[in-house]
Image (cartoon, helix red, strand yellow):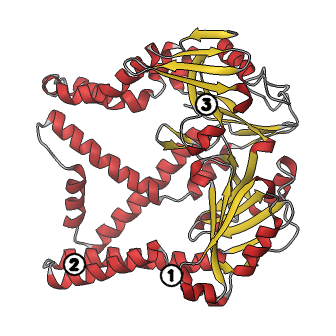
């Protein structure tokens, strides 16, 4: 063996520190502030459930050993149920580092290993934790079988002074990214986490089983004045803006991208530092995403499709950012510098007017229409209080109008084209996506018409399969002419 068998660093137990210990720390801090430990002691079963995650991490650390020889990475794990995993070094696609705040304090690195098997799940993913010296040695050994070794493999960081091919994203750009991103998900998360926090605090300190979400809903319904309701909505939106800006800044602080001969090196993060080395030949394409606000300001976020970047990471989805935010008129220049092969030589073909009605045959529009109909029936036959009737109807009407606007925007955004090197497509409603794919990385193409009448009118939905993490491995464009499918199919090299 050239390395091991060895356990990783014991700080592996604390890699998900805030997720595993956050609730426990919050309960202890509240007890200290209130000076009341009795409620904490009375809820030992709750604390046992909270401690389950760190205990499982401890068992995983104690019974997992890593070994590397000239041909493979060997991972032996398990306490009661033993498991042995072998990954040939020739199949490893990326070996990258990350550091949460605890790891940064002790100069420990999380080493994340990916191979082609990770595309279909977690079978190809291995996570280890080592001190800096061992982490770099492991990276060298794991990538030793690469046909074109990275000459800068010894460095875990490349500063702007060391390379003229580095672009550093300014703090203003990262703040703007957080400001222009969609806030709907953030607001929903705030409401969800707020409800959980109310339930937990009530259970521990008030000895009451309170449904936090129900308590918040009752409070909202108790507000009768339209001005107060409008003020509450504005307050929630502004809270979403503030949280989005803060989280985006913390996550992408110090973002820099470096162009190497055979790879692209990316690093970012404040509390959780991450580095990624993307092998250019493994990159399938890019996606330029624009929310409504981003489209108004002619900017967008550039993402990349690459194995090992953007994979499911412990139940959270890592967005594969190639650059946080970039002006639309600078996109072509940026791609020529980093990925010059992604260039389209012909104009895209948009959807036809006859396809417009078929865009309404989608889940979000049909669901919103059914929801509005159900709300109308409920307010007539079942709901008696006028204020609740008004709230239900207004909410369902807004959902329906949002779905309607989304469908109309999708019709205007849809287009596709292909040449010998690149496949181009645009799609999306409120968030417009412009996708450029390397023709040689497309694994399959299929077309599917949802109705016989649609096929008779020469319309179809085109779906492309690419080598990328599961969430983005299928790219779809709805309701294009059948001739577009034939044109794209002819350009594929498989």
Task: Name the side, left or right, on which 441 lies relative to 67.
Answer: right
Task: Name the side, left or right, on which 172 lies relative to 343.
Answer: left
Return the mark for residue 389. Answer: 2
Q: Earlier in the sequence, mark 2 or mark 1?
A: 1
The secondary element bearing badge 3 is classed as: strand
* Residue beneath the point at 16% across and 24% down: 36
Tell me whether circle 1 and circle 3 mark residues in contact (CB < 8 Å). no
Check disc 1 and report the residue beneath it: 360
**Label 2 packing within 10 angstroms: few (<14), some (14-19), many (20+):** some
Gap in angstroms between the C-alphas marked 3 and 2: 49 Å
Q: Earlier in the sequence, mark 3 or mark 2?
A: 3
Tell me whether circle 3 and circle 2 mark residues in contact (CB < 8 Å). no
Residue 104 can be seen, yes or no: no
Q: Earlier in the sequence, mark 1 or mark 3?
A: 3
Above or below, 66 relative to 97: above
Gap in angstroms between the C-alphas marked 2 and 1: 27 Å
Give the x, y percent position of residue 212: 23, 49
Above or below, 330 relative to 317: below
Task: Name the side, left or right, on which 279 lies relative to 164.
Answer: left
Residue 253 can be seen, yes or no: yes
Check disc 3 and report the residue beneath it: 273
Give the x, y percent position of residue 231: 35, 65
The image quarter in which residue 256 lies: top right
Of circles 2 and 1, the one toward us is 1
Give the x, y percent position of residue 471: 57, 52
Q: Nearer the viewer, residue 299 or 83?
A: 83
Return the mark for residue 246. Answer: none
């Amino acid at each position: 063996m050239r390395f091991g068998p060895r356990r990783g660093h014991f700080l592996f137990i604390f890699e998900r520190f805030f997720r595993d210990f956050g609730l426990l720390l919050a309960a202890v801090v509240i007890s200290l502030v209130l000076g009341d430990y009795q409620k904490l002691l009375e809820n030992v079963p709750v604390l046992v459930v909270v401690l389950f995650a760190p205990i499982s991490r401890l068992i995983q650390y104690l019974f997992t050993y890593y070994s590397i020889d000239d041909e493979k990475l060997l991972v032996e794990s398990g306490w009661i149920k033993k498991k042995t995993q072998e990954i040939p070094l020739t199949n490893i696609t990326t070996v990258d580092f990350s550091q949460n705040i605890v790891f940064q304090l002790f100069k420990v690195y999380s080493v994340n290993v990916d191979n082609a098997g990770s595309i279909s799940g977690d079978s190809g993913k291995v996570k280890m934790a080592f001190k800096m010296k061992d982490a770099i040695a492991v990276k060298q050994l794991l990538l030793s079988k690469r046909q074109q070794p990275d000459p800068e493999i010894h460095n875990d960081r490349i500063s702007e002074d060391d390379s003229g091919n580095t672009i550093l994203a300014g703090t203003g750009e990262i703040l703007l990214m957080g400001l222009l991103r969609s806030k709907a998900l953030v607001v929903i998360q705030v409401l969800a986490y707020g409800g959980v926090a109310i339930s937990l605090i009530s259970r521990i300190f008030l000895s009451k089983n309170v449904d936090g979400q129900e308590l918040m809903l009752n409070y909202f319904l108790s507000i009768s004045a339209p001005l107060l309701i409008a003020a509450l909505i504005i307050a929630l939106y502004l809270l979403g803006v503030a949280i989005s800006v803060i989280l985006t800044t913390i996550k992408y602080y110090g973002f820099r991208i470096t162009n190497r001969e055979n790879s692209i090196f990316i690093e970012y993060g404040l509390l959780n530092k991450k580095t990624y080395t993307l092998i250019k030949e493994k990159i399938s394409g890019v996606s330029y995403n624009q929310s409504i606000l981003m489209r108004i300001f002619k900017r967008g976020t550039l993402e990349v499709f690459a194995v090992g970047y953007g994979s499911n990471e412990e139940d959270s989805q890592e967005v594969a950012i190639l650059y946080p935010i970039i002006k639309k008129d600078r996109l072509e220049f940026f791609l020529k510098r980093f990925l010059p092969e992604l260039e389209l030589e012909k104009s895209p073909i948009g959807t036809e007017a006859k396809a417009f009605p078929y865009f309404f045959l989608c889940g979000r529009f049909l669901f919103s229409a059914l929801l509005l109909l159900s709300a109308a029936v409920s307010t007539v036959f079942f709901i008696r209080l006028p204020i609740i009737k008004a709230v239900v109807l207004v909410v369902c009407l807004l959902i329906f109008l949002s779905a309607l606007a989304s469908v109309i925007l999708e019709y205007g955004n849809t287009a596709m084209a292909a040449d010998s090197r690149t496949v181009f497509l645009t799609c999306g409603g409120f968030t417009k996506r412009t996708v450029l794919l390397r023709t040689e990385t497309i694994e399959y193409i299929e077309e599917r018409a949802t109705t016989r009448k649609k096929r008779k009118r020469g319309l179809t939905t085109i779906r492309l399969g690419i080598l990328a993490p599961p969430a983005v491995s299928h790219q779809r464009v709805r309701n294009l002419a059948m001739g577009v499918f034939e044109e794209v199919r002819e350009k594929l090299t498989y």
